[in-house]
Every structure is written in C-alpha cells, then in structure tokens.
Image (tube, coloured by chain):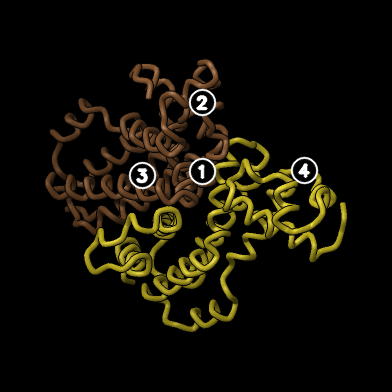
Chain colours: A brown, B yellow
C-alpha cells in the first residue's frame, strides 16, 4: 500500500464527500480518485479493498466529528448540573451541523453496514465504544442521572440528528416557540435528565 | 400511465426491496423490473419518473408499516396510563422489526431526500403529518404528558429504530438486564413519559 499520509487523508476525505453525495453504492475507487482530483488508480494503491476504505472513513469521521478539546475543557469547568448536559448536547449538535457532510456519510455507513457483515462488525464496535465512553464520562463527571438516562439521551439525540440532518424542516414549529434544533435539544435534556 | 393496480403495487413493493438492498442509487426502473420479474420497460409505463416512483413508495410504506386496526382498537380499551404508551411503542417497534426491509427503505428515502429537493418536500410533509397525528392522538386519548413529551418520545424511538435496524448488536447489554429492543422501549417510556 502506498504511504503518503497527506494523500491518504485527502483520499479518505474525498470518500466522505462521495458517500454523502452519491450514497454508499456510489463509493467506488474511481469516484474517490475523481473527487480527490488524482489519477485513476490512485485510491487502489492506498486501500486493499472497499471495506478497508470504509473502515478508514469511519476512523476519520471520529476525528472530524470529535469535540474541540478547548471547548470541552471549558465546559468541564462549569457546575456539574443539567445545564452542563445541555451545553454538551448543544456542542454535539453544532459539530454535526457544521460537518453535515461527515454526519450524512456516517448515516450512509450504517445503511451500508446492513449489507456488509464485516463493516457491520467494525461499525458496531465503534458505535458501541462511543456510547460506553459517553456513559463512563457522564458517571465520572458526576452529571445528574444514571446509565439509563445517558442511554435514553443518546437515543433521543440520535433521532434528532437523523431528523434534523435529513429533513430539517420536519420539526420546525411542531412545538411553538421552540427553535430547531437548539431549543429542542434543551427540551430533550429537560425531559430525560433529572434536575440533580 | 399503465393502470393495472395489482401490477403497480407489485412494482412499488419491488422498489422497496431494491431501495433497502441496493440503496437509493441502485433504484432504477430496470432494477425494479428485474426485481418484480416483469419485462424491461414495464416500470417506465407505470411511473412518470423516478420521483413519482419514490413518492408512491413512501405512500406504500405508510400502509405497510401502519398499525393493525384490531390490535390498535384492543390497546385503546386499556387504562390511559404510561403502560399503555409502552404498549403502543412495543407495537411500533414490532411493526418496524417485522418489516425491516420497509423501514430500511424509509431510511434510504431520507438520505435520498438530502439530494432531491422535490422528494425532500414531499417526504418532509409526510413525516411531519405523522408526528402531528401522534401528538394529536396522545392528547385526545388523554395519555400522560404533553406535546413536548410526545416529541421527545418520538425522537428517542426514531433513534432506537435507527440503531436497532442498522446495528442490532450495538445496544446489546449496554444496560445489564435490559433486553434490546423491548426492554429499552420500556426504559425510554419510563424516562420520558410522566407517570400520570
């Protein structure tokens, strides 16, 4: 496999663009080469097969969608109450909205995982690890609510992310005076997370 | 447009299969003809264009995934408390799991809607109408919780459906002793819906 790390990284980002724009079936080495503006045949020098490319896209999206360390550290100086949970969830929503292409590519990966057992196994592990990390973080930070709270919060945010990033107008005005998505994030946290 | 209603319906169901199995990009008239086992060119006699086929798939999935009227009527004879909400949510989850292909096709439609403004407009209307119907139903049946409760419940169930139908093992054992998905459905309702 070819080893230029910048070119590899550019190819993986091109793969993210193709996934989001064309769907999983459009993700071919040829389409990635075209998106990255490199000669035909380049991607096949960097990835053993399409599954290897998909795994590297998953890893890359974790980095692209990860919290900003400074922002995260700042949030952690605040009192460990429900409004801090709102802060973390606003930050999650803001990251996914800013990198909507990256988040849509993740959704395409989920659907592709239903068709490819190997991708399903690796993607299941990474989604599961994220959820467990969230549960541990919530516990260790001393935020209100137990593991069930975090799991239900995770699912409601997953639903909101899916709805807001695919059909942004569907939730607009459903609850009068509640903005989408930020106002809805607050209502989710107030409904799911106990006050203390 | 050709008018044999049974053949039209068989073509739309074939479109659902193709969408779930191949993804939105694989949904061509030719693939639908092949899936339905009819001569090449048949689908193009039944649908003006691909958007028309996608709209009819949306309508068809509403029927395929709708509650069974007898089951629904039986649930409505029970006391209007939180455990009835659990009953309705179990029924929703059971329907989506039974017709997993249909639900996966709906998820493909969401992603396709991000690429096609016309589909996005019609799909937004149908998703929105479903949510408003759910809110109205909850209110008129006198179930516990207000419009916010129903909206948050809707989002958490949407997240659970996405997770369970694409990566069924990801939630397995996250909460010890809580089965996936039915045990999780109960925890969601207990967390989101007030007792009375």
Q: Please give the residue where the numbered disc 1 appears in the rendered image.
A: A172
Q: Which residue is mark 3?
A: A185
Q: Is residue B29 left or right of residue B21?
A: right
Q: Between B186 and A194, which is closer to the camera in this rendering?
A: B186
Q: Is residue B115 above or below residue A10?
A: below
In what element is the residue under mark 2? helix
Q: CA distance from mark 1 to mark 3?
A: 13 Å
Of marks 2 and 1, the one in the foreground:
2
Which residue is painted at 25% across and 58% down in the image?
B174
Front in this rendered view, residue B144 or B9: B9
Disc 2 or 1, which lies upstream in sequence? 2
Q: Nearer the viewer, mark 4 or mark 1?
A: 4
Q: Residues within 10 Å of mark 4 (few under 14, many from 20)?
A: few
Q: CA distance from mark 4 to mark 2?
A: 29 Å
Residue under disc 1 on the same chain as residue under disc 3: yes
Instruction: Name the subunit of mark 2.
Output: A
Q: Given the image, what chain letter belongs to the residue carrying mark 4?
A: B
SS at badge 1: loop
Circle 4: element type: loop
């Amino acid at each position: 496999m070819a080893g230029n790390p910048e070119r590899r990284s550019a190819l993986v980002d091109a793969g993210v663009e193709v996934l989001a724009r064309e769907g999983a079936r459009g993700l071919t080495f040829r389409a990635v080469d075209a998106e990255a503006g490199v000669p035909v045949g380049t991607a096949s020098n960097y990835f053993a097969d399409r599954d290897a490319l998909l795994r590297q896209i998953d890893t890359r999206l974790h980095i692209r969608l990860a919290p900003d360390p400074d922002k995260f550290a700042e949030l952690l100086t605040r009192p460990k109450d429900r409004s801090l949970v709102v802060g973390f969830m606003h930050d999650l929503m803001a990251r996914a909205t800013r990198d909507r292409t990256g988040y849509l590519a993740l959704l395409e990966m989920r659907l592709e995982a239903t068709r490819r057992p190997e991708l399903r196994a690796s993607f299941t592990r990474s989604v599961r690890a994220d959820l467990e990390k969230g549960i541990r973080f919530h516990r260790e930070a001393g935020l209100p609510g137990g593991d069930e709270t975090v799991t239900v919060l995770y699912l409601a945010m997953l639903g909101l992310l899916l709805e807001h990033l695919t059909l942004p107008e569907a939730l607009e005005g459903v609850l009068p005076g509640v903005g989408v998505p930020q106002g809805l994030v607050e209502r989710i946290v107030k409904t799911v997370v106990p006050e203390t």
